[in-house]
Image (tube, rainbow, N blue to C red):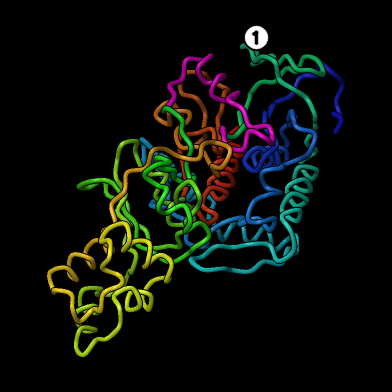
Amino acid sequence: MASSRPPGAAYDVAVVGAGAAGMMCAAVAGQRGRRVVLIDHARKLAEKIRISGGGRCNFTNRDAGPANFISENPHFCRSALSRYTPQDFLALVARHRIAWHEKHRGQLFCDESSEDIIRMLRAECEAGNVSWRMPCAVDAIDASAGGFALRTSSGLVRAARVVIATGGLPVPQIGASDFGLRIARQFGLRIVEPRPALVPLTFDPIAWRPFAPLAGIALEVGIRTGEGKRVAEFREGLLFTHRGLSGPAVLQISSYWQPGQAIVVDLAPGIDLAAELLGAKAGGRQHLANVLAGLVPRRLAEQWLAVAHPGAGERRIADLPDKLLREIADGMKRWTLVPQGTAGYKKAEVMRGGVDTRDLDQQTMEARSVPGLYFVGEVVDVTGWLGGYNFQWAWASGVACGRAV
């Protein structure tokens, strides 16, 4: 995509990163009459939007609010989220006549394709006469008289203001990098240590060996981690993998999990498992494994018993003492594991951490110590839950910045 202005021309705003937050910011600023250039190193526009939601883009969550986000400075996101809501984005979607549907827990998806959202954002940028430099790598950004000088692979770009919308570190195979974090450090901003979030959890291969054959088994669970006031809990689907655990429940809890910390899994949420097992004793000729198989997937029941209580699964439940049945029930309701780590940025959906929001203005996203420098989207230390929340942060932070630059 070529620029509509000659190389070296001055712009009011240069937005680095043509993803969700970057395009939204550029479109809003351009439609306010600002001369905007949007720069991205990728050859393919908005690849992370394209692959999201299984190709249908879970573009927001109807219930998104500050409580659904994690940050070292948790109140920072309130301003942007309150000024640009899921209903505001839905109004934009409606203007572009994009059909959508709602899945469980307020998750909204395109009926057809994530390409609909990309085309919409591109059209909004065109409505603001945004200039494009793509593919175009930014080699350096320097403060200069009247703003900033961006040294790029297609020449020098001068702009009064610069917006960094380069995203986080996940999915490096489609071009993710630490560019935004490096720029923040260059200009003296603090960084909350980044790490993978919304990511599968992995376990020591030897310790996990008994459960590796369960790969592919899925069930709804309760899951929690943390202590005291810092406990996080979810009830979602869990998926066994060869290396550990995945599925929505685990992706959610991974954003809160700290290395060395345990996770606690309730394999039968909403069920009084002790009462069920004790009730099955009356005249019970079934084996314990068969009773449990009526409450959780059979392969899981058999393998969990084989590891935790060898031999118990093959015994008639009527022959087992109440104390043992209560112990088994408690173990399955509070299965405690300590992950070895995560599946890393290749499998993570987002990055936790990033530019410290205590160094940014919550109304505008501007760096407090560097007038004219802004950060939006995933590069900022605001991380949403699974289910459209991170897109809503991209839209909201992009709009807040676009209205200010």
Report the front residue among 355 and 321. 321
User: Looking at the figure, which quarter contains the C terminus?
Assistant: top right
User: Looking at the figure, which quarter contains the N terminus?
Assistant: top right
Position of 190 with respect to 151 (left or right) is left
Position of 301 with respect to 115 (left or right) is left
Q: Disc 1 marks which residue?
A: 145
Q: Which residues are magenta?
A: 169-191
Q: Is residue 205 above or below residue 57?
A: above
Which residue sits at x=50%, y=34%? 380
Instruction: Pinpoint residue 97: horizontal percent, then vertical percent.
Output: 75, 64
Which quadrant of the structure image shows residue 271?
bottom left
Position of 374 with respect to 309 (left or right) is right
Q: Is residue 204 above or below residue 54?
A: above
The verdict on residue 74 being magenta is no
Report the front residue among 346 and 177. 346
Instruction: Pinpoint residue 121: horizontal percent, then vertical percent.
Output: 73, 47
Which residue sits at x=63%, y=24%? 162
Which residue sits at x=79%, y=45%? 127
Let me know if residue 36 appears in the view.
no
Disc 1, SS: loop
How many numbered marks does the figure carry? Answer: 1
- Amino acid type for the residue under numbered disc 1: Ala
Position of 327 with respect to 352 (left or right) is left
Instruction: Pinpoint residue 228: horizontal percent, then vertical percent.
Output: 20, 47
Let me know if residue 334 appears in the view.
yes
Which residue sits at x=61%, y=57%? 58
